[in-house]
Amino acid sequence: MKLLYLDCFAGISGDMLLGALLDLGVSEDALRSELAKLKLPGYTISTRRVVKQNIEATKFDCIEVTSIRSAHHRGYTEIAGMITDSGLSAKAKRRALNVFKRIGEAEAKIHGVPLDSIHFHEVGAVDSIVDIVGTCVAIEMLGADEIQASPVPLGSGFVETAHGRFPVPAPATLELLKGIPTQSANIAMELVTPTGAALMAEFCAKFAPIPAVRVEKIGYGAGSRDLDKTPNVLRAILGQVTGAENDVVAIIETNIDDMNPELFGDVMERVLAAGALDVFWTPVQMKKNRPGTLVTVLCEREATDRLVELLLRQTTSFGVRIHEAYRRKLTRAIVKVPTRYGEIECKIGRLNAIVVQRSPEFEACKRAAAQAGVAVREVYNEAARAAGDIQ
């Protein structure tokens, strides 16, 4: 699988992302030709090599060359119509429309107005339209199968917008970053723009440390600012995924020594039904020499709040601990293998495209054994032998 990984250590904006894609090898001439299909007048684009804290990068610039009506106040409906009526590919159109819709819905929610009433200010300007549409076009040209990104630093301080002075991140940016992991950064400026946030929300399938990849190309897209200690660039890595998959999970823990043991089974069922990846109990010795239970829940990041509230409601705990862990996993697939007892589902695990684990699904074996009136181990062993032929 060809992966595009965005290392957002200095934040992300539309021009940084587009610069990084061009630095990876997307043709500027081809991009210019596609953007012409948008029929957006009054601008020119250029690229140049710049150095940011000793890192050479591509700086993408969109320069407005004429005065355009409502240049900074285009509405969502006008921009959507412009994209729909263009000669862009169906995929580029769909992606660009999705990005603008995300921004429009964020603005509509913040201002309490319908989407069709939204008039973009900064994002409605020529350069922002070019950044968004150009990125959608460039990503299609690059041909990556999946895009992932690192958690994004938010920056600090205040930003001046058309609606006034707001703390970083700006309201629309924060709304667009819902569900995306962020990290603090002791840099007093805006590191993630609304355009950057919307593009990440649209394109990135996962936000985690870089997985195991065979690196093919590295591109750097430059921002417009100079930071004190960090190069103001976005690093884009293109490569083939190798080995195991990776992700980041939340771990929720709490120690309990005063709950009726009969309740633990019910708690486990409720937590699993609410979306936990795994739940397990560990006996521990607590203060005052009391035997207790360490409750551990693994879950996706976005399920953390929901599961924490469930534990606090359903157990006697007065508080929980939350931390995150980086996981590496085999590439998994469920296949059905033929046996005398019917087809049995087996979990297959691959490392570097080679099968290293074959495990019959116990519940499937149990059902087949009950129907055939034989021991579960007979079905399990036959399914395991059948799975041994899978490569």
Image (spheres, rainbow, N blue to C red):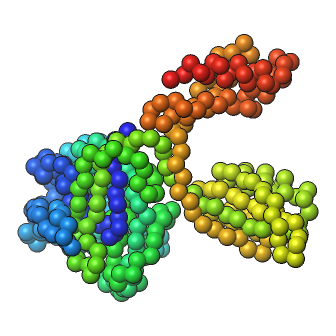
Up-down relation of residue 183 to residue 142 (above or below): below
Quadrant housing residue 235:
bottom left
Q: Nearer the viewer, residue 100 or 173?
A: 173
Q: Does the rendering let one see residue 127?
A: no
- The x, y position of residue 101, in whole percent, is 38, 59
- The x, y position of residue 258, in whole percent, is 89, 69
Residue plotted at (60% across, 66% down): 323
Quadrant housing residue 62:
bottom left
- The x, y position of residue 352, in whole percent, is 44, 36
Quadrant housing residue 13:
bottom left
Task: Report whether 311 appears left or right of 259.
Answer: left
Q: Nearer the viewer, residue 114 or 233?
A: 233
Q: Does the rendering let one see residue 254?
A: yes
Residue plotted at (38% across, 85% down): 157
**Residue at the top extreme of this rendering:** 340
- The x, y position of residue 168, in whole percent, is 40, 80
Residue plotted at (88% across, 70% down): 290
Residue plotted at (40% across, 74% down): 154
Up-down relation of residue 383 to residue 102 (above or below): above
